[in-house]
Amino acid sequence: MNSLSVIIPVYNNEHTIEKCITSLISNTSDIEFIFIDDGSTDNSSYIIKKYQSNYSNIRYFYKANSGVSDSRNLGLEKAKNRLIAFVDGDDFLEKYTYDNILDNWNERCSLFVFDYSIKSGNSINKSVLNLTNSEIFLQSENEKSEYINSLLNLNKVPHIGHSIWNKIFQREIIVKYNIKFNKSIIIGEDLLFLLHYLKHTDCLMTTISAYYYYVRHDSSVMNSSTKDFLPLYDKLSNEIGALRNYLNIANFKCNYLSNMVFYVLNSKYYKNLSLGEKAKYLSSIRETNIINSLDNYEGISLKRKVIIKLIKYNMNYIAIFIIELNDIIRKI
């Protein structure tokens, strides 16, 4: 019989954690809910403990603030059950999500992926991934390499996403191969964990059901100041590049990193800079390892390749012209 440990990192989630908890306790299967309080200073702990007093399958652990990756790693250490899932403290799920998944789990598969919706204010973007009900077999190293490449090459569909909260993992694989979250990475840490796990996955299941609701906040890392992203992207670029040999990928495609760089170049922060400030900012990109990494990756569009080359060879003003010309063309 399948049993599940759900790990929920919490940090000052007093306004959202109750909705998260009520969506979890609707499940009746053999499930433990592990709340890792990452040094909250609000009423999060009070709310969790209130439910803990009525539900024996709720476990609560407090630690000094050290980030979501460290919290998830502690949750993995505390987990007892066969399967592992993750939920963020400001998100929630459809009722009976895990009951439905466990009832339909195919024992041959070591990864289960479900769709999700994005809630932003009062609007909801449903079924973001447009998954189907299917099983994907990755029997050979070549099949795994190709699949991982397709995961990094964002133009491929269907796509299972880079997040971990719309997936269920086998604890045995995580423990056996010592798969953990990199505490030094705060953008892309989910992807790195997933890539390491896929290396040891022979079969995965996907479902059309959008069980998870990702709640988008202005205060999230991806919505914080764009000017601070470069060192974070640079570190992630180095980590992904280091995985090339480990994952046995010869022709490495990485639209994922490309999208991150061009997210910065399309941001309000960048667009509001003066011409000289933009040139200086492109120089700061060139000083990181990102541009060299992207220059060696396949699967990136010709337009992006040209801009990357121009930045690499310090032709910043030509790069700025092409970026702004592209913006004008898009608006026509």
Image (cartoon, rainbow, N blue to C red):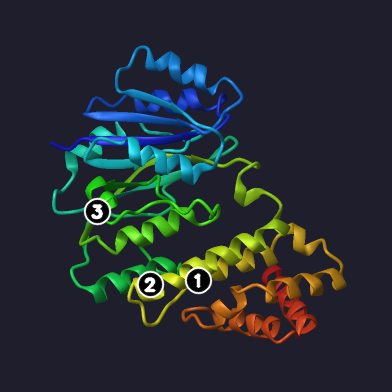
The residue under the point 34% across, 29% down is: 33
Residue 151, picture quadrant: bottom left
Q: From mark 1 to mark 2, how far is it between C-alphas? A: 10 Å
Query: The disc labelled 1 sits on which kind of residue?
Result: Asn
* Residue 149: mark in rendering: 2
Mark 3 or mark 1, which has the lower sequence index? 3
Residue 27 in the image, given as x and y percentages of width and height: 28, 27
The residue under the point 69% across, 77% down is: 286
Residue 243 in the image, given as x and y percentages of width and height: 41, 70
Q: Is residue 99 left or right of residue 301?
A: left
- Pointer 1 with pointer 2, Cβ within 8 A: no
The residue under the point 42% across, 42% down is: 72
Query: The disc labelled 3 sits on which kind of residue?
Result: Lys
* Image quarter (top left, top right, bottom left or bottom right) of the C terminus: bottom right
Task: Indicate the secondary structure of the residue bearing disc 3.
Answer: helix
The residue under the point 87% across, 73% down is: 276
Residue 95 visible to the viewer: no
Residue 78, picture quadrant: top left
Mark 1 or mark 2, which has the lower sequence index? 2
